[in-house]
Image (cartoon, helix red, strand yellow):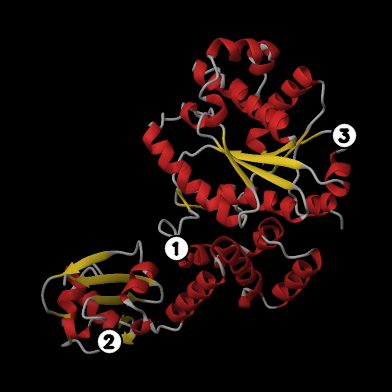
Amino acid sequence: MNLYEDLVWRGLIKDVAGEDLKKKLNEEKITFYWGTDPTADSLHLGHYSSLVTAKRLALAGHHPILLVGGATGLIGDPRPTSEREIIQKEVLEKNLEGIKNQITKLFEGKATVVNNYDWMKDYNYLEFLRDIGKYININYMLDKDIIRRRLETGITYAEFSYTLMQGYDFLYLYEHNHCIMQVQGSDQWGNITTGIDLIKKKCGTDVYGFTMPLILDKYGNKFGKSEGNALWLDLDKTSAYQLYQYLINTDDEMVIHYLKVFTFLSKEEIEKVEKEHFEMPEKRLAQQTLAREMITDIHGKEEYEKALHLSETLFNGKVSELTGKEIEEVFHGVPTFEITEDENILDFLVNHGIVTSKREGREFLNSGSITLNGEKVTDLEMVITKSKAIEEKYVIIRRGKKKYYLGVYQI
């Protein structure tokens, strides 16, 4: 397949501007841009779903410009329900550096990274109104979906003007970098078309754009959201192990779609994985492939192999082989408590909320449903001591098959 047909097969094209976009993508080498505002100091999987498409275009020979919105970030893209909180300049600058570093790493230094603050900071307000504002009709702006939805609850002038700023970004990159296409998630379609119209009116040139559908899980939630928390591309915020656990638990009905969207495997390779996966779904081949490809692309082969090792160690119950650092990574988010003294196993279970009573504790112990650092505990007289802790610090309790607790001696 050529590039355009491959994008369609993967489900990566939703809205299209430009009649001969297919020809441009398949037969020419063009410059395009993708942008984001630095609302945090790290990107997350929601951004990655767009960035991986930009990287796909780059691998096909097109040149990517990756824009980090130091100017637009000070205003804030209108949200569907309410105004964004204003980000302080110092915070914004810190966020900018974090995101620029991630983008540079992901594209292996083969993309141009720009900041729209560089061309907006000295632009006089009166000049901007004369140069840009006069080309965009108010009725046209009111018809933008995101603005129309906010009219009932109210929208500030700053948010209302956001589409002009993003439209100017496209014009600036067209004039200075010969950028002729913008690629974004589907929520940015209104801003893309503002830029296209602005370039047409000011320069008399037709340019291009397309959006990608929003990637959702089977419940309609945004991909990469876990109980309201984003899965970050920053290893200090979301470890490779945590990302592995999220991906390995992908639903069967969604995993092939995710392989198309998030990996660079060919159509033939994905179809082969699909066939083998559904012959033996219990082996979770498709999920394993998804985790391997995504984590390797985002963090590198070493981090993927580390995440795989931690997962297999936990699955096999060999938690005593983990280092202290690995324990903190694997058991991040599980119920954790401080151990201050030696305790009988029953007292330990009750006092730390692992069981509700000594009677329940006896039942769990007698049935072999309690493990301590990977070993079953059946002795009701056992005493938990520092010498039994991993590195004389960590006590990992498992109740049943999946419920974990972490006790920590303070050294």
- The residue positioned 21% from the left and 85% from the top of the image is 388
In this rendering, the answer to whether 128 lies above or below 346 is: above
In this rendering, the answer to whether 324 lies above or below 208 is: below
Which of the image's four quarters has the N terminus? bottom right
**CA distance for labels 3 and 1:** 43 Å
At label 3, counting other C-alpha atoms closer than 10 Å, the crowd grade (few under 14, some 14-19, many 20 or more) is few
In this rendering, the answer to whether 275 lies above or below 19 is: below
Residue under circle 1? 239
Q: Secondary structure at mark 3?
A: loop
Q: Is the Cβ of the residue at disc 2 closer than 8 Å to that at disc 3?
A: no
Camera sees residue 154: no
**CA distance for labels 2 and 1:** 31 Å
Q: In terms of image quadrants, where is residue 187?
A: top right
Mark 3 or mark 2, which is nearer the start of the sequence?
Answer: 3
* Left or right of 282, for residue 59: right
Q: Amino acid at mark 1?
A: Ser
Residue under circle 3? 19
Q: Position of residue 269 (x, y in %)?
A: 77, 70
Q: Position of residue 236 (x, y in %)?
A: 40, 58
* Left or right of 332, for residue 116: right
Which one is nearer the viewer's eye here, 174 or 289?
A: 174
At label 1, counting other C-alpha atoms closer than 10 Å, the crowd grade (few under 14, some 14-19, many 20 or more) is many
- The residue positioned 21% from the left and 74% from the top of the image is 349
Mark identifier at residue 377:
2
Q: In terms of image quadrants, where is residue 134?
A: top right
